[in-house]
């Protein structure tokens, strides 16, 4: 009897071992079978970088998608890449297999913003910093900012109303910078905000220039300005610690943080994350706002419907004498859909980058370790399969929720935008004061687009403003 059970156990053990061996062999075979996605790698060394910079990159991606399908390879900026243009693939990269892919940015950009900024990281450090950023941008936190955002919106729009030609993108950059400063510092003395603005403008110019550290170049000036910003931030931090003013805005959240061992965040980590949030907040929101001015200008019926919605609120708040409330901002359905459709149409963040940390297989294709992986948000947002007549601005399409993973203006997964609610609140408030107070005429009708670095209407949308009768 004992002998029989030894035999049975041995057979069982051997069969487990054999099936394990067979599974491993099958996996190995599958791996060898997996092939690289279709596509062309362009010229040696330069790949297809030139096409990306000489043409509208979105035209290039759309042409490739037509030719090769939803997954294709290419070679840009010195790196082999796999581009993915389906909702399932974007979900695979950003959500379900995010642990196999890490965020990746050019070294020059990382140096300029600061290597400790959360978007360059993963794991425990990213989770910790993200929680702090997210809580400073939660609905509870941002609703307290409404009166100050209103003040910024009113003063920007008043400065536009001067019978001169105004470049809307430039004005919206100033506005979104000020809202960024507000959400980070709550109140900030003007001596600090003025100098931060000056230095930040220099950094902004250098960020998108050629990364050469030669004297006199925009990049070198930007690096110097970035160091000065660190000094300004250190001065603000030490003053706040002295005055025990530590409870407000993102800076308050970062200063108050203590880990399990009771350690606080080092000042360079605080500085890099503050600059990171300012960067993430400014050009993005300003570009989308500029598109909203254009879409409302170009469609009289739409402008009428949005104006009607806001005039009703304006009348209820005693002809605009009372400040907007959080509840009112939650009840602007026509305007909210205009914002959603603008985010889809403009798709200002057309794609994002990740890097495979191991060999990955997706739908029988191999994504080799070290290759860049790019989910193409714009291709998905502009696909007739998910959005009928995709090139037409039609905000009523958002009466029905888009299909899962087809709408990602703020990304998806662990790195999705923590500032999305602030950005939308800012847009609702600007639109409210715009349509209740002003008329505007765009100068030189054109549908041309330029990249600054996000797509914006040509020349940043020059326009003239008038007060409403
Ligand atoms: C319309 C305006 C905005 C758009 C379209 C936008 C879009 C995005 C997208 C697509 C991502 C994800 C990038 C990726 O996965 O690689 C992202 C990340 C981020 N955004 Fe925004 N954003 C906007 C405004 C803002 C604002 C106002 C803030 C802050 C006040 C902000 C802060 C951030 C931060 C900190 C990240 C990095 C998150 C992380 O890595 O965990 N964004 N944004």
Image (cartoon, grey):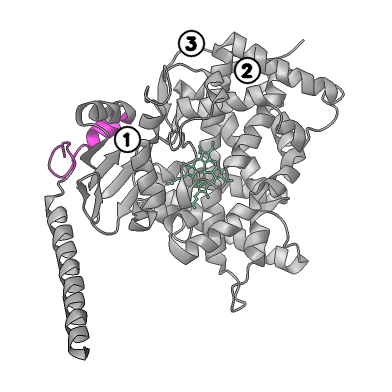
Against 188, residue 317 (above or below) is above
Which of the 4 quarters of the picture holds residue 388? top left
Q: Residue at x 46, y 25 (%)?
A: 345
**Residue 39 in view, yes or no:** yes
* Between discs 3 and 1, the one toward the N terminus: 1
Report the magenta residues as a range.
37-57
Which of the 4 quarters of the picture holds residue 317? top right
Percent coordinates x, y for residue 453 in the rendering:
42, 35
Q: CA distance from mark 2 to mark 1?
A: 43 Å
Dot 1 lies on which element? loop
Q: The C terminus appears in which quarter of the rendering? A: top right
Residues at discs 2 and 1 in contact (Cβ within 8 Å): no
Q: For the residue carrying disc 2, how many other residues have a C-alpha within 10 Å: few (<14), some (14-19), or many (20+)?
A: few
Dot 2 lies on which element? loop
Q: CA distance from mark 3 to mark 1?
A: 32 Å
Residue tagged 2:
164
Percent coordinates x, y for residue 21 in the rendering:
15, 68
Percent coordinates x, y for residue 131 in the rendering:
58, 58
Query: Is residue 46 rendered magenta in the image?
Result: yes
């Amino acid at each position: 009897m004992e002998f029989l059970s030894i035999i049975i156990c041995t057979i069982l053990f051997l069969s487990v071992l054999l099936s394990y061996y067979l599974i491993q062999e099958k996996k190995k075979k599958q791996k060898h079978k997996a092939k690289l996605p279709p596509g062309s790698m362009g010229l040696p060394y330069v790949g297809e970088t030139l096409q990306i910079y000489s043409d509208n990159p979105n035209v290039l991606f759309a042409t490739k998608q037509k030719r090769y399908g939803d997954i294709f390879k290419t070679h840009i900026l010195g790196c082999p890449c796999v581009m993915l243009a389906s909702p399932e693939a974007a979900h695979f990269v950003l959500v379900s297999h995010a642990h196999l892919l890490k965020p990746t940015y050019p070294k020059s950009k990382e140096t300029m913003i600061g290597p400790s900024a959360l978007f360059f990281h993963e794991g425990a450090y990213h989770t910790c910093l993200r929680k702090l950023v997210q809580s400073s941008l939660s609905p509870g936190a941002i609703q307290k900012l409404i009166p100050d955002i209103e003040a910024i919106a009113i003063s920007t729009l008043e400065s536009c109303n001067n019978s001169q030609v105004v470049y809307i993108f430039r004005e919206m950059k100033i506005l979104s910078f000020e809202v960024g400063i507000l959400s980070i510092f709550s109140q900030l003395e003007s001596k600090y905000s003025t100098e931060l603005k000056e230095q930040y403008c220099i950094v902004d110019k250098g960020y998108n220039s050629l990364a050469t550290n030669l004297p006199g170049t925009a990049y070198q000036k930007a690096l110097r300005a970035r160091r000065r910003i660190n000094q300004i931030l250190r001065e603000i931090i030490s003053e706040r610690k002295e005055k025990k003013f530590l409870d407000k805005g993102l800076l308050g959240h970062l200063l108050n943080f203590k880990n399990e061992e009771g350690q606080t965040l080092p000042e360079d980590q605080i500085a890099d994350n503050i600059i990171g949030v300012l960067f993430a907040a400014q050009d993005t929101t300003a570009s989308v706002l500029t598109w909203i001015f254009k879409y409302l200008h170009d469609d009289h019926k739409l402008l009428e419907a949005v104006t009607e919605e806001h005039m009703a609120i304006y009348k209820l708040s005693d002809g605009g004498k009372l400040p907007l409330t959080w509840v009112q901002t939650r009840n602007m359905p026509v305007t909210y859909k205009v914002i959603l459709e603008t985010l889809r149409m403009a798709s200002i963040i057309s794609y994002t980058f990740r890097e495979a940390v191991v060999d990955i297989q997706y739908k029988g294709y191999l994504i080799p370790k070290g290759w860049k992986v790019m989910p193409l948000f714009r291709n998905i947002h502009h696909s007739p399969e998910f959005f009928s007549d995709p090139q037409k601005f039609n905000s009523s399409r958002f009466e029905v929720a888009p299909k899962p993973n087809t709408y990602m203006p703020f990304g998806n997964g662990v790195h999705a935008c923590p500032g999305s609610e602030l950005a939308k609140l800012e847009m609702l408030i600007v639109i409210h004061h715009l349509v209740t107070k002003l008329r505007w005429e765009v100068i030189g009708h054109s549908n041309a687009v330029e990249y600054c670095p996000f797509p914006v209407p040509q020349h940043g949308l020059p326009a003239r403003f008038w007060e409403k009768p």
